Image: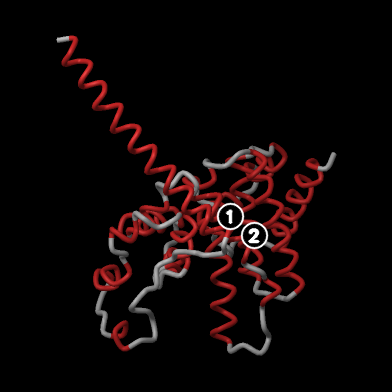
């Protein structure tokens, strides 16, 4: 019996060591690609505007053409996976749902790239790296109205995704504070380049969720708990009930929090 037990132990040990080696090789390859500026994202063969996309009749057919082949998906670096999700033709669909968490869960349920990203342990850090690349200063007043709208929607939809707890709970306190700072800098840029009010609110949707649920900034928690409109805003990104006074309060508590970091 001892001999059999030893053989089973050795067998399991070999499997564990083999998995660790594969994981380390995968991480090393991804780090090398990132250092060279190479992003192994998926190129979708069918996208909106093409004759093939116009032939799609329903949600199921759209899902079929945006799901990534599994052998490609599971070998994709997390940064490449983030880019694949953000460039997915269905990326903005989350905005169609009143409850953004429900929308996110449907995306995860139906689209394999979102499902895989939600399971990656480094998803939040790579998502944050992508968020840093979105610069409101790139807004171009000579664009068509559709191009302007697409640009702004992409920024605040990304803020909605990044605000999901499946990502935020992966981060340290310092990393969460970095996101708050980055989101506020983006708000200032959105203000400077006169982006839409909805786009500006996206910064505070992300900031508010972090301050309330993750960093538990007590002054902000007290403000939210005594406000009839902000709880709905933080869960659903419902901008309609948010007043200009609420908007100013969101800015006030964000600046107050950031000031505490410098004390």
> Which numbered circle lies on residue 128?
1
Q: How many labels does the image show?
A: 2
- In the rendered structure, the answer to whether residue 236 lies left or right of residue 93 reads right
- Residue that lies at the very extreme toward the right in this rendered image: 263
- In the rendered structure, the answer to whether residue 168 lies left or right of residue 114 reads right
Q: Which of 247 and 184 is in front in this view?
A: 184
Q: How crowded is mark 2: few (under 14 residues within 10 Å), some or many (20 or more)?
A: many
Q: Measured from the top left, where is residue 231 in percent x and y?
A: 57, 49
Q: Distance between the residues labelled 1 and 2?
A: 13 Å
The quarter of the displayed image where residue 76 is located: bottom left
Counting residues from the start of the chain, the first of labels 1 and 2 encountered is: 1
Q: Measured from the top left, where is residue 23 in percent x and y?
A: 40, 43
- In the rendered structure, the answer to whether residue 18 lies left or right of residue 238 reads left
Image quadrant holding the N terminus, namely top left
Q: Measured from the top left, where is residue 13 in percent x and y?
A: 30, 26
> Which numbered circle lies on residue 22?
none
Looking at the image, is mark 1 or mark 2 nearer the viewer? 1
> Which numbered circle lies on residue 203?
2
Q: Which residue is drawn at 20% across and 15% down?
A: 5
The quarter of the displayed image where residue 44 is located: bottom left
Q: Measured from the top left, where is residue 201 in percent x and y?
A: 64, 63
Q: Residues within 10 Å of mark 1 (few under 14, many from 20)?
A: many
Above or below: residue 118 compared with residue 16:
below
Image quadrant holding the C terminus, namely top right
Q: Nearer the viewer, residue 138 or 239?
A: 138
Q: Residue at x 68, y 45 (%)?
A: 177
């Amino acid at each position: 019996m001892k001999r059999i037990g030893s053989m089973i132990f050795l067998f399991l040990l070999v499997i564990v060591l083999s998995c660790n080696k594969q994981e380390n090789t995968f991480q090393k390859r991804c780090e090398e690609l990132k250092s060279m500026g190479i992003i192994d994202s998926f190129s979708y063969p069918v996208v909106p505007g093409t004759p093939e996309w116009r032939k799609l009749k329903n949600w199921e057919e759209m899902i079929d053409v945006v799901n990534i082949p599994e052998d490609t998906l599971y070998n994709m670096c997390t940064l490449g996976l983030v880019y694949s999700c953000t460039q997915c033709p269905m990326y903005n669909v989350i905005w169609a749902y009143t409850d953004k968490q429900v929308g996110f869960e449907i995306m995860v349920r139906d689209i394999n790239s979102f499902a895989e990203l939600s399971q990656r342990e480094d998803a939040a850090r790579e998502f944050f790296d992508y968020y840093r690349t979105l610069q409101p200063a790139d807004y171009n007043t000579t664009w068509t109205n559709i191009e302007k709208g697409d640009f702004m929607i992409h920024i605040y939809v990304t803020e909605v995704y990044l605000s999901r707890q499946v990502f935020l709970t992966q981060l340290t306190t310092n990393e969460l504070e970095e996101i708050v700072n980055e989101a506020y800098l983006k708000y200032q840029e959105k203000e400077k380049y006169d982006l839409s009010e909805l786009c500006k609110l996206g910064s505070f949707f992300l900031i508010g969720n972090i301050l309330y649920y993750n960093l538990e900034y007590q002054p902000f928690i007290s403000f939210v708990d005594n406000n009839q409109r902000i709880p709905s805003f933080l869960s659903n990104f419902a901008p309609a009930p948010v007043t200009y006074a609420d908007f100013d309060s969101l800015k006030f508590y964000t600046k107050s929090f950031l000031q505490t970091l410098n004390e």
